[in-house]
Amino acid sequence: MNKPASLVPQPVFSRSFGKGQRQVLAVHCSLAHSGTWRGLATELSDEVTVTAFDMLHHGRSPNWDQRGDFQDRNVAAGQSLLTQPMDLIGHSFGATVALQMALRRPELVRSLTLIEPVFFAAAKNASLLFDLKEQNRPFTDALKAGEPMVAARLFNRMWSSGAPKWPDLPETTRAAMVRAIEIVPACDPAILTDRTGLLAPGGADGLVMATLLLHGADTNPVISAVNAGLLQHLPNASLAVIEGAGHMVPISHPAEVAAALRKFWNT
């Protein structure tokens, strides 16, 4: 079922996968779209129904209108689909959106799974954050120079471990990434600073739902630091690592992620 999510300033596109009774809401990573959850949903198709939406500036959703905060607008879009208690899953920047959704409507989040969250403010490791800034420099320089295709290729190369490389991607996929790349800097306030106070004393007290922090064993070291930091703040969190996987673990290793989710949900 494909439909626009309404009751938000900019309605977004959503779709559903699977036929199981367990209701899951999933939020994709930057430069991707809701269809990237198809592999994981297929692994769980008899157990869950996955609803996924395209964030603004991605997939079939409209471009962000530059009003308000980019993360906040996607949180609002996600909340319009959170109409009953559901298991909430987010990947990368989508994990930061899911985290904020859970913080604002905890009564509607049965469980929370954050896959490779890029909430770098939680890392608390100056060396790793400096390394990340240096790794980002070629991408940010290309974007500032008005070369979005180069920027998208460099960003994809930095984070696409375990996924197809730029030359192997279909032209339509590359074009979608070029479209989305311009809003990546708009994510910085939400991922580099704790602007909502989640990491402050008592800031995460409302997040009492079971939470799974998941990353690939071969991911960027800063992600492990993020998860370690979140583990200290979230009241009911546990950690899982997928061997042989990188940042794109829900796409590259759907069977292993599905197994981790089954174990988490059944604990």
Image (tube, rainbow, N blue to C red):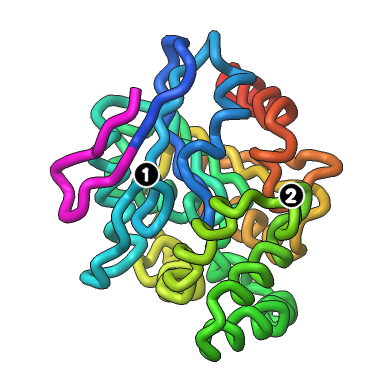
Q: Quadrant of the N terminus?
A: top left
Q: Reply above or below: 183 against 23.
A: below
Vertical side of 210 occupied by 227: above or below: below
Q: Residue at coordinates 32% horizontally, 26% vertically from top-left?
A: 85
Q: Give the camera-side residue of 212 and 135.
A: 135
Picture disc at residue 164? 2
Amino acid on which the number 1 mark rests in the picture: Ala
Residue 207 among those drawn in magenta? no
Q: Could you say where residue 77 lies in the image, as x and y percent from the top left?
A: 27, 47
Q: First in sequence: mark 1 or mark 2? A: 1
Q: Quadrant of residue 150?
A: bottom right
Q: Is residue 134 left or right of residue 197?
A: right
- At x 44% / y 19%, what residue is drawn? 49
The residue that appears at 79% across and 45% down in the rendered structure is: 245
Q: Amino acid at mark 2?
A: Pro
Whether residue 193 is visible, yes or no, is no
Q: Nearer the viewer, residue 183 or 189?
A: 183
Total residue callouts? 2
Left or right: where 30 falls relative to 10: right
Work out whether residue 252 can be spotted: yes
Q: CA distance from mark 1 to mark 2?
A: 31 Å
User: The magenta stretch spans which residues?
Assistant: 1-13
Q: Which mark is drawn over residue 102?
A: 1
Q: Count neighbours of disc 1 (C-alpha within 10 A) and say few if under 14, some if 14 to 19, many if 20 or more.
A: many
Q: Circle 1 — which element?
A: helix
Element marked by disc 2: loop
* Disc nearest the viewer among 1 and 2: 2
Q: Position of residue 177 (x, y in %)?
A: 53, 60
Residue 193 versus residue 263 in the image, above or below: below
- Left or right of residue 64, residue 260 in this image: right
Asked whether 239 or 148 is in front, the reply is: 148
